[in-house]
Amino acid sequence: MIKKAYPPGQKGKRRSKALSEYGKELKEKQKLRNWYNLRERQFANYVREVLGLQFKVGDTADLLIKILESRLDNVVFRLGLAASRREARQMVAHGHFLVNGKAIDIPSYRVKKGDIIAIKPLKLPKGIFRNLEAKMKKQKSPSWLTFDIKKSEGQVTGEPSFIEAAPPAEISSIFEYYSR
């Protein structure tokens, strides 16, 4: 029996083509969009906002990451209060957090330097916050966030950095995709 390098059949001899430039850009965009658990319209709005500020700001890639990292659902994830960004989004949407003393249930809310993110006192006895101290000992939050276990609140002490965020995609190809 002769084993060939392609599957049997009339159309089996086709080779997979290399990705086009558009395909590579699309793949990078999808990587970052799925990394932050965003819908297409939300992500496109963030990129267009950054592209609009392109001439005012030096590094557009850094600005895009700062915007994405400063979302409330991402901050909750980075503080270690949620195991994933999806879980963090759900916790924010269910109203588990206060930002500067106000109840916020919008995952896309942007936090600023000096904002205090606290768990609602009524939600602390809930199942997801029961082993908070054990969870927080394992978690290492980024340098721009601090968390006080005794008060069960975190504070934004700085701005997110591109290096610390370490996005899985090439940001320049994302801007090329949206500048068509």
Image (cartoon, rainbow, N blue to C red):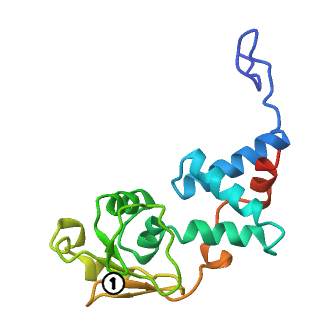
In the picture provided, is 66 more to the left or to the right than 178? left
Figure quadrant of residue 56: bottom right
Residue 85 at x, y = what percent?
44, 61
Q: The residue under label 1 is which amino acid type?
A: Glu
Q: Is residue 94 above or below residue 4?
A: below
Q: Is residue 70 above or below residue 28?
A: below
Q: Is residue 140 above or below residue 94?
A: below
Q: Secondary structure at mark 1?
A: strand
Residue 111 at x, y = what percent?
49, 75
Furthest residue to the top? 10
Residue 63 appears in view:
yes
Give whichever of 130, 148 is nearer the camera.
148
How many numbered marks appear? 1
Quadrant in the picture for the C terminus:
top right
Quadrant in the picture for the N terminus:
top right
Give whichever of 39, 51 is nearer the camera.
51
Q: Residue at x 70, y 20 (%)?
A: 7
Figure quadrant of residue 136: bottom left
Give whichever of 163, 89 is nearer the camera.
89
Mark 1 residue crowding within 10 angstroms, few (<14) / some (14–19) / many (20+): some
In the picture provided, is 77 more to the left or to the right than 150? right
Residue 166 appears in view:
no
Give the residue pinned by disc 1.
Answer: 153
Q: Residue at x 80, y 21 (%)?
A: 14
In the picture provided, is 27 more to the left or to the right than 122? right
Residue 105 at x, y = what percent?
35, 62
Figure quadrant of residue 54: bottom right
Q: Residue at x 59, y 45 (%)?
A: 40
Residue 3 at x, y = what percent?
73, 22
Q: Residue at x 35, y 57 (%)?
A: 90
